Image: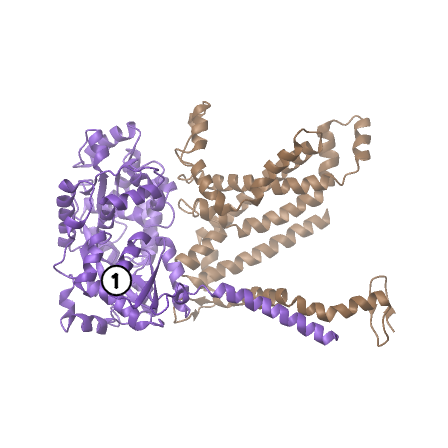
Chain colours: A purple, B brown
Amino acid sequence: MTRTRRFLIGAAASVALIAGGLTACGDTGGSKSEDVEGKTTINWWGFAPDTTVGQSYIEAFEKANPDIHVVYKNFENTDYAPALRPALQSDEGPDIFEISAGGNVAGIQLWTDYITDLTSTAEEALGADWRDKFAPGYIDQLTVQETGELAALPLGGVGAQMFWYNKTLLDSLGLEPPEDYDEWKDQCKTINDAGFTCMAMGAGGDMTFGTELLRTVTSSVDTEYWVKALKGEASWEDPIFYEGVEILRNMIKDGIIAEDAIGVQQYPEANNVFMSGQAAYVQMGTWYTQYGGREAQIVAAKAAGVADPDPFVMMPMLTPNLGGTKPGMVAEVEWGFAVNPKSKHMDAAKKFASWFTTTTEGQEVILHYLDIGLPALAGLAPDWDTIDLVDPSIQVDAYKEMYAAAGETAETRQLHLSQETSNALVVAVQEALATNNSPEDIAKKVQAAAVPRP
Amino acid sequence: MPTKTTDSTITRGRAPAPPKRQGKARLKPAGLGWILPAFVLSVGVIYFCIGYSGLLSTQENRGGTSGGTFIGADNYTNALTNPLFWGAIKHTVVFFVLVSIVQISMGIVFAAMLHSKVRLAVVYKVIIFLPVVIAPAIMSPVHRRVFATDGPLNWILEHIGLEALSQSWLAQTSTSLLVVIGVQIWSSIGFAFILFYASMGQIEPEIIEAARIDGASNLRVLWSLVIPSTRGTIFALLVLNVISSLKLFDYPYLLTRGGPVYTSDFLGTYIHREAVALTNLGYAAALAMLLLVLAIGASILTNLRARER
């Protein structure tokens, strides 16, 4: 064998090894996975719902659309955008992904380069007056303001600025939900002395849940201030914000928030504390309604490490008077289905997005699992008779009241929240809870870093 | 004719080389083919990426399809005037100093102890070395639990009368960096131990015996004979620690996410946050280039210092 020939064989073998390796790496592309013969397979990536609920959605969809097979990939909130961005830039991204009104998880402003205008899909499904058939505001919130393109079809709404409590635990301690700060503080002493956590909270890491509590307490001082600040119509260097920071700080000193809130993250740690029955309260929005159901709560409790869960009665609580007034809920579109313009199965992807968002049948499936309890199509509501709650005699009315409060509010949740402001507020919460920095100093940094989103 | 110019250098002419040399020479072209993967990976991927990062660092680039805008050295100026950058550098220096001191001193102590006649020495060696081979991703949830407010560390402190020391280790700006350092020390002592153990095995027993005959105590032998004999290992560990401190990402990300309030932030977590969470690609690339310069500079300095010695 000549020297040249040996060199060529070596080179060819090396190239083959590299090519083989790269091929192996690259073969996990979204649209190629889990194909089913005779069906069009589409891939859906999202930060919600949980995989089990998502699978239930898919089963219902596939039953109604047997020619389409759907594969769902669920991400933690903080992993969603980092995973989705390169996927959408490639040719192997998901066919369907989720977009929300704002914020740094799935906010519409992050994805304007990667959308398909779904206006014609909506019009085809609902007629010329399609906009009027959706709940007020949802379509605007998922429309790219600069171009008028409909980035996603709304699945439903979300309400927040509220709490959930473990009624079974409160009953065992002879307690009722508090009306104001002092009552809550006294109650938390009883709860903490009994060996439980008063309010499970995770403000560590990049998650934004801590900022929702800062917003809630600030809105207890002035109900209109927060959105004005997000829009740039008010400064963060404002006595209202200072007071909000002080209240938040006092909540940890007074034992309302767990001492280690900064050291843990909302998901999974704080969530697990509440779902395992170790905490009386947690701040979450309407998406938490799903865990009021027996089966969903058992699954969540097992995931939280409880071997043999005994479901507790989970009840919503509107915000007590924490700083002078009781702020109402905030609400907006939860998220919508967007279609990847590079999808190789555009028709199937649009059908999937359209079926859940523009048909009564699809919306009823969504409402049944309570991950989203506010429908996108006006006039629908969960069918409580078919939902297995732990104690429907008290839960149903409370849930209805919660949804009514969310439906009535005009104040949005993340619509005006830019990525920069969101990150600045995450750090502000950590500074409030973990340092002695003055509220003025904290506000100054937020003001410097925030980018208004009118 | 091959001309032998020195003991180790050969220049080749047309005539065949001596058989031994000829064999090696004939292998070279074919061997080039076999090293192609490494060549392609290192030149084609690593150095291309460094070059591309350099280009990216001169742009305002937020990802997406629109590409970047050339802004010159603005990203570098912003980085060098940003307190977060200097905070990360400060944490890196503190981390390097503390980890190096404890890792090297404990590595020497363990190696010296296990060179004496200790029962069950193999078991001790395994116990000391085991943390080195466990991935940070596996251990970090355990460490988070250990340092939790209601975790085992505080439980132990409370049960041995040190309740005053019990605290929220991960939730405080004053302790989060110490947790990262402590966990890194735990995971890296075994590595230092194994190097020192091998290094001490090279010391002639006669030298130590002579010192003992001259009346040297154990500590004196350790200080005056053993440690100077392992100087090369110490410098190797320092170089490795400089590089690993600058590149540190796994433990701070997995334990504290660089928080709270950036108090356990390192260049690795800072770059990751800017590049991935904030999609500030140009700025992240500038930070990466600064990291590269620091890593190369620190390695050169440490090596020069080692040579001087």
Residue A267: x %, y % from top left: 34, 46
Extreme residue toward the front, this view: A37
The residue pinned by badge 1 equals A63
Indicate whether A444 appears above or below A169: below
Give whichever of B69, A311 is nearer the camera: A311
Give the residue at x 16% y 53%: A382
Q: Is residue B181 above or below residue A36?
A: above
Q: Name the subunit of mark 1.
A: A
Q: Nearer the viewer, residue B247 or B123?
A: B123
Question: Which quadrant is home to the N terminus of chain B?
Answer: bottom right
Going by the numbered disc 1, the residue's amino acid type is: Lys
Do we see residue A141 in this rendering? no
**Where residue B112 appears, x then y in whole percent?**
69, 34
Of residues B241 and B128, the one drawn nearer to the viewer in this rendering? B128
Q: Is residue A430 left or right of residue B83?
A: left
- Give the side of residue A210 with respect to residue A379, left or right: right
Q: Residues within 10 Å of mark 1 (few under 14, many from 20)?
A: few
Q: Is residue B179 visible?
A: yes
Q: Residue at x 12, y 59 (%)?
A: A379
Which quarter of the picture shows residue A322? top left
The part of the image, by quadrant, that contains residue B69 is bottom left
Give the percent coordinates (x, y) of residue A308: 32, 37
Q: Position of residue A202 (x, y in %)?
A: 34, 43
The image shows residue B162, relative to residue A389, as above or below, that is above
